[in-house]
Image: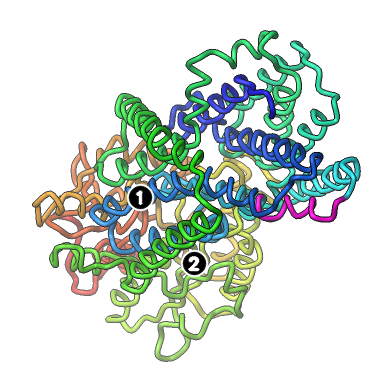
Amino acid sequence: MTMYRPEIDGLRAIAVLSVVLSHANFAAFSGGFIGVDVFFVISGYLITRIILGEYERGRFSLVRFYERRAKRILPALFFVALVCLPFAWLLLMPSAYEDFSKSLIATAFSVSNFYFWKKTDYFATESGEVPLLHTWSLGVEEQYYMLFPLLFLWRFRVSTIFRIVAVMAVCSLAFSEWGARAIPSANYYLLPGRAWEILAGSLCAFYAILGFRKPNGLLAMLGLVMIVVAIFLFEPSTRIPSLMALLPVVGAALVLLFSSRDNVAGKILSQPALVFVGKISFSAYLWHQPVFAFWRINSLEPPGPMVMIGLIMLVFVLAMATWTLIEQPFRHNKASVFRVATAVIGGALAFVAIGLFGVIKDGVPSRLDPKLFAFIDTTTWSSRCLIQVENGLPTLPWKGCMFDRDGNPEVAIWGDSIGSSITPAMVKELGARGDGIVQLTHGHCAPILAVSIARSGGAANCDVFNQQAFDYLLKSDVKTVVLAASWVGFFNEDYLNVDGREQSRDSIAIESVRENLSETIGRLQQDGKKVLLLYPGPRFSKGVADQMAAIMLKGDDTPTVVYSHADFRQNTARAYAFLDAVEVEGLERVWPEKIFCDTAASCTFGRDGTAYVADRSHFTRAGASLVATRISGELFPSKIGGSGQRQDIQ
């Protein structure tokens, strides 16, 4: 029997508190996400110690191992998922409920890390409203648990297994360092880039079981300091996992190897309050994301610090109850392997069935009031002809994206999804004049030559796409080019590639981007083309349509969403600075600010039940129509709008 070490529970407490405080958006804990890395090290250590203890006594059983893991993880996980169901049913819009249903299926099969790898940027603002996002880490651990024990079936000597594990850890670390740059999202979510962190804990277990572990207060304290430094100094933009993650991972390993009740680090971590938090840490981890997410979904405003403190207290109350009533009884239950397997399979199939129902029924819109459903169904943005990385790079222009009877369009929309969202309205607006449009849009790609988002899989093709779009424009008969992009999001990215060199957000010089954008515009003008630059609207913290839907749920059928003009200016300030720096004679500019901000105090992005923005930035049909009218007025000042009438917000 392995002697209980309270300092390990204290280390668990540090890990879970850092994750919770980070996800609660307390800026001081910007690197708190590394708590997951610490959890991985602890899991690897404890699991390997158990296996090695049984292996050396000739009592290791793969079936018993899987049974213990199932009892440890699944009852609390299934219970939290079950409690999430009614809140998801009541609060989520159809598309969000469909996504929730898919994540429920993935969680039941222990593959939610694969689902979220394809679906969600972990550090994006909207990730805070994804109730089961945190289950990705459980997917990583469960996949590790399925594979790692297989090493012990061949009856190798412990020293041989140790060498195999060490080689695997080094290979995984090397892969994660490469993957952090080449495939950052997959590297973050999937086992190959994460395995070395868990294997680091396993190596600590080998070190201890072979009799090398001797407490060392200095090294233990160094390890604790390394973890704390990572929590307070790392940023969401820090490449994790990678060599950077050695700071918290090695720190956790030093604590596991060298702490004891008799040294300072061990005494700190063995404080009763920390030990108790460590005991309920798994349940706290399970509860924190759905509690935060459903509150954010239901609230019209982002929760402030006092609200988040209250939610954190609720998380730990729920965690104590779950640990007492679910975790402990199931963990110590003496049920047979057959009963455990039956319960696991039955529970998983039940969640799969519920999830399939949500997917097949397209998010079950019948849950909603017909008026609300009609609002949601029509409050969308156009992604037609929006190329994504998975589409590859088709020959430009796509035939289906030439909105011109003669195949010789005079106007081009070049940019990203913002350009995509306004194109249908531009087609309608200019079609009355007989002017055709060609759409050249790619997700995450702002229309600037040799400037693109770094560290985003979705932006992987941008430089090539933009060059192809530019080359096409030069050889075409297009007379006017409209540049439209998610400028706020683009210029707020943590890293951009500028002329093939990666630059951090703080080091990007306005001059370097200005030169590229000015050159892009200038070369188009030299070819005889008129260029119009569409300025940004704000990037909202919560979708405009979602805000209006939430108000409608409370009984107001014709809500209006007003946004502070001062907040508009603050939200768009960085993007404005970059765009204002471009001084090219003859460049036309259109400011959505002049369309939607009808007073000095406020801007209106939804009026009387009509949303002008569908989500956090993309224009709805109604909003795009207002923008298209203003663009048409700039292009053809003698006729403002297809009907000859101004269509700004009244």
**Drawn side of residue 344 relative to residue 602, left or right:** right
> Residue at position x 36%, y 44% from top?
293
> Do we see residue 296 in this rendering?
yes
Does 424 sit above or below residue 311?
below
- Image quadrant occupied by the N terminus: top right
Q: Mark 2 — residue? A: 414
Is 310 above or below relative to 340? above
Residue 208 in the magenta stretch? The answer is: no
Please state if 588 lies on the left or on the right of 455 as rendered: left
Mark 1: secondary structure: loop
Magenta span: 145-155
Asked whether residue 243 appears in the rendered view, the answer is: no
Q: Which amino acid does label 2 sit on?
A: Trp
Location of residue 143 (image quadrant): bottom right
The amino acid pointed to by label 1 is: Gly
Q: In this view, does 443 lie above or below 17?
A: below
Residue at horizontal 79 percent and vertical 44 percent from the top: 58
User: Residues at badges 2 and 1 in contact (C-beta under 8 Å)?
Assistant: no
Residue lying at 51% horizontally and 44% vertically, measured from the top left: 334
Q: x and y percent of residue 385 in the render?
A: 46, 75
Q: Which mark is residue 537?
A: 1
Residue 148 magenta? yes
Percent x, y of residue 513: 59, 47
Depicted 290 relative to depicted 609: above or below: above
Separation of residues labelled 2 and 1 (CA atoms): 17 Å
